Amino acid sequence: MCGIVAYVGPKDAAPILLEGLQRLEYRGYDSAGVVVSNKGLKVRKVKGRVADLAKVVPARFKGSLGIGHTRWATHGVPSDVNAHPHLSADERIAVVHNGIIENAAELRAKLEADGVVFASETDTEVLAHLIAHAADENDTLEEAVRKTLKSVVGTYGIAVIDAERPGEVVVARNGSPIVLGIGEKEMFAASDVAALVRYTRQVVHLEDGELAVLKADGFHTFSSDARETAKEPLTVDWDAGHYDTGGYEHYLLKEISEQPETITRTMSGRLDERFHVAHLGGLNMDARETRGFRRVKIIGCGSAYYSGQIGAQLIEELARIPSDAEPASEFRYRNPVVDPDTLYVAISQSGETYDTLAAVQELKRKGGRVIGIVNAVGSAIAREVDGGIYLHAGPEVSVASTKAFTSTCLAFALLALHLGRVRDLSPADGRRIVEGLRRLPGQIEQVLGQSDRIAELAKKYAPHPSMMFVGRVRGYPVAREGAQKLKEISYVHAEAYPASELKHGPLALIGPDMPTVAIVPDDELLDKNLTTLGEIRARGGQVLMVGHREPDAKLADDVIVIPKNEIELDPILLTIPLQLLAYYAAVALGRDVDKPRNLAKSVTVE
Ligand code: AGP
C-alpha cells in the first residue's frame, strides 16, 4: 500500500524516482510526489497519477538525492496537500511514509500546542516535524529518526532526507516493507523490488525495527537500539521485462494469458512420475513430521483466502486431513487456539499483507508450525515462516490477482499430493493427480482460446447492476473468486453463495435483473446443480453456466464449456473463464482495469 522510492548517487534523482513510482503505482494511485535536495529541498506533488506528477516536474528539477511516493489515502482525502512528501515547517526535513501512525492525533496535538502549524491532514506530517526537532538536538539524521520513531505507535516504512545533509537518505521499517537496492556508487530504496530491478538486482530487505543509512558509496543498517546489523544481499530473479505489459492492453490480460507458463513454473521440478509424489524441499519437514499433523489450518486475505478454501478441499480429498481456511484478518483477532499437531499455511502473493503477516507472527509466538505459499521471494511472510512453497509465477502487477491465484491452487494440489502420499493416497490416485496436473497448462490454453466468445458474453451481462455466482463444494470457492474478480475490477455488484443456500434466502433476489453465473462441473453434484439452475430459471433469472458440457435440458442461457480433468483439479480450470469474464466486463464498462478505484495491490495496513 503506497509506494516509496529513494535515490542517492551521481545521477539526477527525479527521473529515477518518477520511473520507480510508475512501477509502484499499483500499490496506490490517488496522489504522488517527489522531493530532491539541491541547495534546499525542491518538492512537487499532485493529486492524481504519476503521469500527472511527471507533467509538473520541470526539466531543471536537478538534485542527485531524492525521495518519492505514490499514495493510497488513509488519513485525509487525496489532494495536493495531503500527497507525500511532507516537510517540516522550516523545510529542512522531508518524509515519505507507508503505513499508519496510530498515535498521530496525540502527537499532532502536542506539536500544535508548541506552535507548529500543520499543512496537511495526514498522520505522516507529524513525523516531519518531530524529526526536524530531533535533528536540531542530535548529531546525525539517523539518530534524529531513531529518536522520533521511539515516540511513534503504528506501522511504517519511511524514507527521510535532510536539506542540511545532502548526501544521505535514512529509511526505516516497521510493518511496511522497505528494500534497499545496491548499485555502482549509487544506492536505492523502495517499498517493492519492482522499482529497483531496472537499476540493480542486488537487494537487501529490512526487518521490522531496522533502520538504514544510504549514501552513494554504500549503506549501513541498524537495529532500533542503534546496534549495526549484518545483512546479506539477495539476487532478485525478476528483471525489468517482467514488469512490462508485453504488448497486452492491460497487465491483467497479460497475467491471465500467462497462466499456462506460470502454472508450469509452479510445478516445475516438483512432480515425480516414478512414485507419483510431489517434492517440496522448501517445507523443511521430514516424513515423520509430515505424517504427524492432525489438522491443516489455512489463512490468507481476499483471493488468497478463497484459494485457501480450494486448498483445504484438496488436502481433505487427497490427504484425508481435516482442513479449513479462514481470513487471516479474522484469525489474528480472535485469540485462536494454537495446536502443535496442526500445520498452519499462510498464503500471500505479495508476502507483505499486514493481516496475514500479523497472523503468522501470532502463530509463531504461540509455537505454531507455519509454512507459507508465497509469490514474492524474500518478502516479509516468506522470511517469517518455517518453510514453504514459492509460486514462481513472476511479478503480479495488476491489482486483481489471477495468475497467483491459480498458482496457489496448484501449490495446494502439490501439498495435498505430498501429504496424501505419505498417508493413505494410493499410487494409482497419485498417478492420476500427477497426470492431471501435467495436462493443466494445455487445457488452460484451450480455455484462453475462447476469449473472444467470453468477451461477447461479458458485453451481454456487464450492463446488469448485480450478478449472483453459485457453486457447490469445489465450485463454491470458485464462485467466490469469480464474484470477487467481477466486483473489484468492473464494480458490478456480485454475490457468491453455495448453490444449496440459494433457497434459504438469496433466491428472493433472482429475477430478470439479476443473472446468475453457475459453476457446474461434471462431478458427483451435477444433478443437484442442474436442479438449482431450474429453480433460477423458473424465477425468470438468466443463467450463464461454466462447466464441462451443455446441460441436456435448456437450463442455461449461455454455457462456457471447459476441458475435463481430474475432479479434484476442476477449480483451477473453472476459474479461468471467470477471470476473462470479469476482465472483459471491466473493459466493456470502460473501467481502469489494472488500478480499480479504492484498492491497492499490497495491503500493508490493518
Ligand atoms: C485479489 O484480486 C485482491 N486484490 C486481494 O483480495 C488480494 O488477493 C489480497 O489482498 C491478498 O493479497 P496477498 O496475496 O498479496 O496477500
Image (spheres, rainbow, N blue to C red):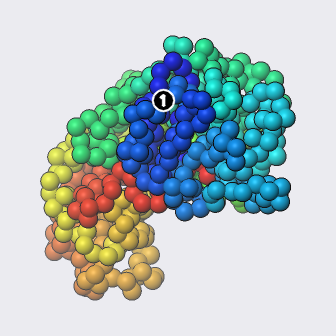
Residue toward you, 464 or 85: 85
Q: Is residue 541 left or right of residue 7?
A: left
Taking 568 as reference, is 13 above or below it? above
Residue 85 percent across, percent down from the top left: 58, 44
Does any atom of ligand 1 lie closer than 8 Å to the CB of label 1? no
One can see residue 56 in this view: yes
Q: Is residue 564 left or right of residue 571?
A: left
Residue 48 percent across, percent down from the top left: 43, 54
Taking 550 as reference, is 130 above or below it? above
Residue toward you, 155 or 469: 155
Q: Is residue 255 left or right of residue 300?
A: left
User: Residue placed at 39% from the left, 57% from the top?
Assistant: 596
> Label 1 belongs to which residue?
62
Going by the numbered disc 1, the residue's amino acid type is Lys
The C terminus - image quarter: bottom right
User: Residue placed at 47% from the left, 60% from the top?
Assistant: 598
Around disc 1, counting alpha carbons within 10 Å, would you say few (fewer than 14), some (14 to 19), or many (20 or more)?
some
Residue 369 percent across, percent down from the top left: 68, 39
Label 1 sits on a secondary structure element that is loop
User: Residue placed at 38% from the left, 71% from the top?
Assistant: 493
Residue 552 percent across, percent down from the top left: 16, 69
One can see residue 370 in this view: no
User: Residue placed at 68% from the left, 38% from the top?
Assistant: 92
Residue toward you, 20 or 250: 20
Q: How many marks?
A: 1
